[in-house]
Image (cartoon, grey):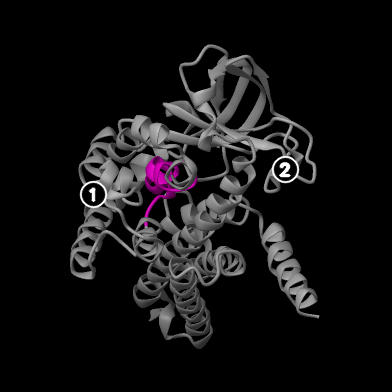
Amino acid sequence: MSDVSDDDFQQILAQTRQFVHTAVVPREQEILAEDKVPDDIRDQAKQMGLFGYAIPQEWGGLGLNLAQDVELAMEFGYTSLALRSMFGTNNGIAGQVLVGFGTDEQKARWLEGIASGEVVASFALTEPGAGSNPSGLRTKAVRDGEHWVISGQKQFITNAPTATLFVVFARTRPADEQGAGIAVFLVPADAAGVEIGAKDAKMGQEGAWTSDVTFNDVRVPDSALVGGAEDIGYRAAMTSLARGRVHIAALAVGAAQRALDESVSYAATATQGGTPIGNFQLVQAMIADQQTQVMAGRALVRDAARKWVEGEDRRIAPSVAKLFCTEMAGTVADLAVQVHGGSGYMRGVTVERIYRDVRLLRLYEGTSEIQRLIIGGGLVKAAQRRH
């Protein structure tokens, strides 16, 4: 169920589309050159409620469900991915841990600030030795009376340079038959011992900031333990990531749609020997492949989101959607560069940026390889249980 009716949602969607096309698309070069989303765009996104669109209304969010979330994500994907990144962790992997697993006190303390954008929540899971699979986690949390002491290093953490709150995954004991031994803690960014590294220099996604975060014996009270229980952590991570995968798949569809639109518009107008290149059948074939892939991805995302909302499939379908759509965006972006010829390889041309931006989609929130393991392993295990 959603807090928002279909009619109201159509208005939100139309406003978001207009915002993306009129406020953000014309400034993509500026975002790229400055490696920063301009403050006025950030303020506008806050006023529109985009920092909390997936946070329930009781906490000041818009209360969109995942089926509505993906429609917005397809709009966000149409422009610099830095836009979505700015409020993505609030609505997605970090915010959803609190919505789904936080205690009443924790929700009351943080969710309104997250929904308004006053608080930037950051999801601190990945480490130098543990990426898409959290079981290799080395960051430790040791109980000390009424407190926990957290120590370890996190890597590639989105929004770390601007974060107010870190949702930190840490090992409280070795994995055993009780569970993974991983707990989740709410650590304010200004807590003593929290050290934010320099901003990462990445291949693409300029304006989306990531960095290392080091926890040097950071003391937090018992009340910082998400859900008030140790073994909630691993489940919180897995649930939050699975939901996030459907969202990332939708983002990929939006980016692929933009690459397609740029290709069609270039093919219709650019000439070779006096003839528009779109009149050449081999160029039409590339565009046909792009269109087919984009439509397949869009249908798949909507289906996976519906299955999530209805509780029908919250494990296999998210991985299928993320695997197909992020790989698809890579293929469509590659074809877009090909359609543009030499100019597609030039900085300042939209498809060159998209080509670099979408490469990350196959890596974060679970690599394509991890998705294949979840899908293949899940199907085989289900069959074994039936026999």
Q: Residues within 10 Å of mark 2 (few under 14, many from 20)?
A: many
The structure residue drawn at horizontal position 23% and vertical position 53%, both measured from the top left corner, is 19
Bounds of the magenta segment: 79-95
Residue 69: name its quadrant.
bottom left
The secondary structure that dominates the magenta segment is helix
Task: Tell me the element at label 1.
Answer: helix
Q: Looking at the image, which is closer to me, 198 or 190?
A: 190
The structure residue drawn at horizontal position 56% and vertical position 53%, both measured from the top left corner, is 239
The residue beneath circle 1 is: 23
Is 91 magenta? The answer is: yes
Give x and y (percent) for residue 194: 55, 18
Could you tell whether 385 is left or right of 263 in the image? right
Residue 270: name its quadrant.
bottom left
Looking at the figure, which quarter contains the C terminus?
Answer: bottom right
First along the sequence among labels 2 and 1: 1
Please say whether residue 120 is visible from this viewpoint: no
The label number, if any, that marks residue 180 in the structure image: 2
Please say whether residue 362 is visible from this viewpoint: yes
Give x and y (percent) for residue 312: 52, 72
Is 321 magenta? The answer is: no
Give x and y (percent) for residue 105: 39, 31
Q: Mark 2 or mark 1, which is nearer to you?
A: 2
Q: Residues within 10 Å of mark 1 (few under 14, many from 20)?
A: some
The label number, if any, that marks residue 182 in the structure image: none
